[in-house]
Amino acid sequence: MKLIRFGEKGAERPGMVLRDGSLIDCSIFGEDYDENFFGTRGLKRLRRWAATFATSAGKVTPPVRYGTPIARPSKIICIGLNYRDHAQETGSEIPREPIVFLKSTSATAGAFDDLVMPRGASKVDWEIELGVVIGTRTSVVPESRAADAIAGYLVVNDFSERGFQLEHGGQWVKGKSADGFAPLGPYFATPEEIGNPHDLKMWLAVNGTTMQSSSTANMIFGIPRIISYVSQFMTLLPGDIISTGTPSGVALGRKPTRYLQVGDVIESEIEGLGKQRQEVVPWQRASASKQSA
């Protein structure tokens, strides 16, 4: 299944993408795609509901705003330097174990929402990443059973303000958590929709120029290892998102460095999980989110 949440900010409704690409409104199912939904076998119940009612459900007619496919999760856990070439371009050592940091859940945004330049920002960077959505309460899980915790996948852009992240001391979270710094989607896909998550092509372009082009096959730590590792330190709750790291090509590693500027357009895609598009707008006149089909 491919699930969406659509509508204006704060008033999103649950929906689904059918095999023919059409969109349906799943409001009548009666649940949002949140922690309770995933934690009570919501995907299984929704699949049964769709088998009977999908063809007669209300259609969603474009243009429509795509909201976050997952209602605000309890946590967004990020894995740093999980691609060897990205570690090298930033002058960092190859990690011996996953580097873990958090991103505020208030940073979530729709896949086509404008990216508002934070107040005082001058080094905003891009990072396309594969997001893993947790489907069940998980703690201290062995790597051999970690895949059982996966509900599905989505695209994450881990936007970063490098000055806030690296020049103000403390932890990376300060440069990762501005409003809009975690666009998700456009949709959430269950595992059978994408096949092998460790062999997905991914790319990101700024103003039409490709900046990142890689594959999830190049991750240092695979998804089961990451889930098992993180679960040793915190309980993962249904609907939580783990963003699994970015390949090389970020602004921080480029010579000369060129960070995002107002008016720039960022487009990105992960194979099987859809495309994103953001336009950078100034903090002073943050525009309403764009409509997109």
Image: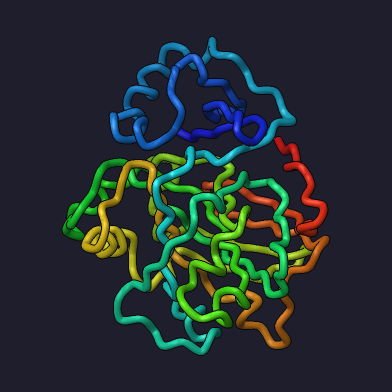
Q: Is residue 289 above or below residue 217?
A: above
Q: Quadrant of residue 260?
A: bottom right
Q: Is residue 201 left or right of residue 36?
A: right
Q: Residue at x 63, y 53 (%)?
A: 180
Q: Where is the C terminus found, in terms of image quarters?
A: top right
Q: Residue at x 39, y 60 (%)?
A: 198
Q: Nearer the viewer, residue 5 or 145?
A: 5
Tag count in the figure? Answer: 0
Q: Where is the N terminus found, in terms of image quarters?
A: top left
Position in image of residue 60 (x %, y %): 64, 22
Q: Is residue 210 above or below residue 65?
A: below
Q: Is residue 200 left or right of residue 65?
A: left
Q: Residue at x 46, y 41 (%)?
A: 189
Position in image of residue 176 (x %, y %): 54, 65
Q: Nearer the viewer, residue 235 or 141?
A: 235
Q: Residue at x 44, y 59 (%)?
A: 243
Q: Nearer the viewer, residue 85 or 239?
A: 239
Position in image of residue 15 (x %, y %): 54, 27
Q: Is residue 216 left or right of residue 98?
A: right
Q: Is residue 245 left or right of residue 59?
A: left
Q: Quadrant of residue 6?
A: top right
Q: Nearer the viewer, residue 207 or 109?
A: 109
Coloured how?
A: rainbow
Position in image of residue 122 (x %, y %): 72, 74
